[in-house]
Amino acid sequence: MVPTGSHTSAAPRFHDFSDPGDLPVPPEQSRTLSVRRGHSISGPRPTTRRLERFAAATDVESRLPSWRAKGSLRPPPPIRKIPLPSLPPSLLARSDLVGALGKGKKDYSTAILERKKSPNRLVVDEATNDDNSVVALHPDTMERLQLFRSLVECWKLSYQVEGKKRKDTICIVLADETCEEPKVRMNKVVRQNLRVRLGDVISVHQCQDVKYGKRVHILPIDDTVEGITGNLFDAFLKPYFLEAYRPLRKGDLFLVRGGMRSVEFKVIETDPAEYCIVAPDTEIFCEGEPIKREDEERLDEVGYDDVGGVRKQMAQIRELVELPLRHPQLFKSIGVKPPKGILLYGPPGSGKTLIARAVANETGAFFFLINGPEIMSKLAGESESNLRKAFEEAEKNAPSIIFIDEIDSIAPKREKTNGEVERRIVSQLLTLMDGLKARSHVIVMGATNRPNSIDPALRRFGRFDREIDIGVPDEVGRLEVLRIHTKNMKLAEDVDLELIAKDTHGYVGADLAALCTEAALQCIREKMDIIDLEDETIDAEILNSMAVTNDHFKTALGTSNPSALRETVVEVPNVSWEDIGGLENVKRELQETVQYPVEHPEKFEKFGMSPSKGVLFYGPPGCGKTLLAKAIANECQANFISVKGPELLTMWFGESEANVREIFDKARQSAPCVLFFDELDSIATQRGSSQGDAGGAADRVLNQLLTEMDGMNAKKTVFIIGATNRPDIIDPALLRPGRLDQLIYIPLPDEQSRLQIFKACLRKSPVAKDVDLNALAKYTQGFSGADITEICQRACKYAIRENIEKDIERERRRKDNPEAMEEDDVDEIAEIKAAHFEESMKYARRSVSDADIRKYQAFAQTLQQSRGFGSEFRFSEQSTAATAGAAADPFASAAAAADDDDLYS
C-alpha cells in the first residue's frame, strides 16, 4: 500500500520499501498501529525475507569488492599519501626552511572557510517527487558512497542528512537516473527542515541503528488547520503513515495532503531516540493545542550565508569562537589557553551584531545579548549585579556566547568619566573577564563603532584577545551583500548586480539593504495607479507583473548615499565633462590622476607604482576650478566630500584639528572618495605667517592636514583636490610630490575655449539661429568662465521677461475680444535671440584684471621653471652595458648638454 503524499510515478519505484514484507521486523513487534483515544489501524504482519534471496534478486553479491568476501562489514579506510617537497634530506630536517618555501606561500588566514573534500558533500536540487521522507541520488553517487552495499547488510533504509546551522533530518535514499552526479534531490519540506536552499551544499551519511519508535507525539501548525473539522488522525496521519515505515526526526515539520487541503505537522517528541521509524505498532499521540507559527524557529534565521562581504573577518571570528567551543582539545594539546574575548569594531551598519547572531546560530551555542545601557540601574550596586548575573547565566548554559552591543556605553575610559557608577562597571567587567575559567566554554564578544573610547585595560590580551575591523566592504563584498538581500526579491532580467556593486562605493551592508528596499518601493510606486488601497486583496495579475528592474535600482542609487557620509556635506555632482567648455589638457590630466586608479587599478599594480594622491587647481576666480572637481567626482563615480576651508576652524582648542581628522576618516571609510578643499589658502597658509593664538591654531590645522595626507592608507583610494586663487601664500610642504603633487594652472579661456563655454552653457536652452556664438567668443577676450555664464544667464533672463510680457498681453487681449483671439492662440516658439545677447553684453564685465592675470602667469612660469630643470636630460646613446659597468655617468652628459641658462633668472 502506498500512502497519501508518497512518491509519484515520475520518481523511481521503491516497492521493496513500501511493502512491509520486504523489511525484516523483530517478532516481538505487534500487528497494529495504536493511538490513544481508540485510534488503531490493522495491517498484515510483516514477514522477514531472507537477505540471501534479496541479494540474489538484486544481484548485489556479484558486485561486492574483495573486502566484502572476507566477511568485513566496512571497507578499510583509504591510505592518504602526502607528497613531500623535493628537497635534500638535510634540508627537510630543518623546519625553519620547510615553513618558508619560496614566495608562493599559502595564505592560511581563511583556511577555516575552505570546504574539506568529501564525497559525502552534495548540492541540493529540486525534487521530482513530493514525498517528505525521500531524497534521490544518482546510482553512481550511491555506489560511491556505498549505500547499495549497506542496503544488503542493513535493512534500515534511512540515511541522516546533516545541513548547516547544525540542523539534520533523516530520509530514505533512492536511486534516480535523471539526478545529476554531485546533486541530491529533495522536496521543499526536507529543505525547510534542513534550513537549506537550492544550490546549498549538504553532507549525506549512512544513519546507523535506527530503531522502531515506541511513541511519537505529533501536533499540527495552527494556521494550516483553520476551518478543518473532523478527526485529523483519520483524515491525514493514518493514510500518511500506514504501511509506509517513514523515518521521523524530533523537531521536524512535514506536510500531509488530503481532502483538497494541506496540513503541516510538527514532530514534538520521539521515543526512544531523536529519530526513529514509524512502524505498525508505534503509538501516535496527537493530543494538544495546535502550535503557533510564530513560536516556531523562523526560516530566515541568520546564518553564515546571510553575512556577506566579510570573508576574512568571518574566518578570524570562526577560528576564535568555533574552535574553542567545539574542539578545546586543540588548544590543550598545543599548550595554550583558548581566546576568551573578541572586539568587533567598524562603522554603523557594517554587520557587527549580525555576525554575532550568525555565529550563535551556527555553533548552536547559548546566546546572551547585553545591550550596553540596559544593565544600568539607579540603585547603587545594581548595575554591577546585573553584569554578574549575565555572566553566571552564561556559565550555567555553556557553551555560550555573551554579546555586549555598544560596549563603549558601559566601558568608557575611566579617567574621562565623571560618574562613579561607570568606573565601577568597568572594574566589574574587567574582573569578570579575568575570572572566566580557561575552558568554561564562554566567549565574550563586544561590538562598537568607537573603539578608541573603550577603557584600555579591556583591550589587552586575556580579555578582548582579538580586535577585528568590520570595515566597509569592497566591490566583491558588496556583490555578496547584494546577492543576499536580493535572493528573495523578484528581479527583472536586466538587473546587473555587478554593475550596482561597482557603483556603490563606500556603502555598508545596511546601506545596500536600504538601496534594495528603495528599489522595491520604486517598483510599487509605479503600480500605484492600478492598485486600489481600499481593496482588501490585490489581484494576482498585478502581483505577478511586479518585478524590480535596473531602472528602479538607478533611481534608488540617485536618492541614497553611504551612511558614513550622511553627516558630512555630501554633494552628488550632476556635472559632466559636457558642462565644461575647453580645458581639454586639464581634463586629460584629471582623468589620468583620478579616473584611472579607480577604473583601472590593475594597471598600476602591473607597473608596480601607486597612483598620485593630490591635485591643486590654481588660477583666477571663475575659471571652473570647483566645476572641474565636481565633474571628475561624477565621471569616475566616486564619492565626493566638499570641504569649505574656513568651516574647519572653530574657537575651541584642538577642535579644528579633530575636524580635519574626522573628514579624512570619513573619506577613508567611503573610499574611493574625492576630498575637495575649496579656498585651500584659508587653512594652508605658510606656517609662522600668522600672529597670535589664532595663527597657532591655523598652523596646527595645517600640520594635521600634512600628516593625514602622508598617513593615508595605501589601500584606500582617497584623492585630494585643492582649489585656490592665492597659490603664492600656500605652505610649500603641501605642494611637494606625495601630497598635492599635480599643480594645474586653470588659465582664462582662449577664444576656442570661450566658444565651448558658450555652447556648454546654452546646450539646454533654445537659441535663435541669428545668434553668432563665434562673434560672442571673439568679443569676450579676457572674460572668465563665470563671466561668460553670467552673460548667458542675463540673456536668458531677458528672453523670459519678454515671453512673460507677451503672455500677459495676450491674456489681456483675450479678455477684451475673446472671439478674435482664437486663431492667434498658438504660442510662438520661445527662443533666446540676438537682441537679448546684445542687451546682455551692455552689462558684461571682466572679473579678473590684467594685473591679476600677470601675477598668476608669473607664478605658473616660476613653478614650471623650478620643476623643469631636467627638460634637457637624455640617456647617453654611447652607453652600453659594458661601459655602464665601467664608469659611465648618464647624468654628466645631460648636465653638459644643458647650456648656461639660468632657469631662475
Image (tube, grey):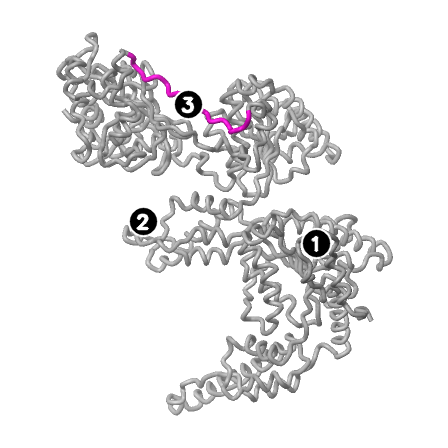
Cβ atoms at labels 2 and 3 below 8 Å apart: no
The picture places residue 869, in percent across and down from the top left corner, at 75, 65
The picture places residue 765, in percent across and down from the top left corner, at 51, 78
Evaluate whether residue 281 shows in this view: yes
Look at label 1 and name its amino acid. Answer: Ala
Q: Which residue is mark 1?
A: 884
Look at label 3 and name its amino acid. Answer: Arg
In the image, residue 797 lies in the stretch drawn in magenta: no
> In front: mark 2 or mark 1?
1
Q: Which residue is mark 2?
A: 536
Q: Which residue is mark 3?
A: 80
Which numbered disc flags the more N-terminal residue, 1 or 3?
3
Q: Quadrant of the C terminus?
A: bottom right
Cβ atoms at labels 1 and 3 below 8 Å apart: no
Determine which quarter of the picture holds residue 344.
Answer: top right
Q: CA distance from mark 2 to mark 3?
A: 65 Å
Judging from the image, what secondary structure is the residue with disc 3 in?
loop
Disc number placed over residue 31 in the picture, else none: none
Magenta span: 72-88
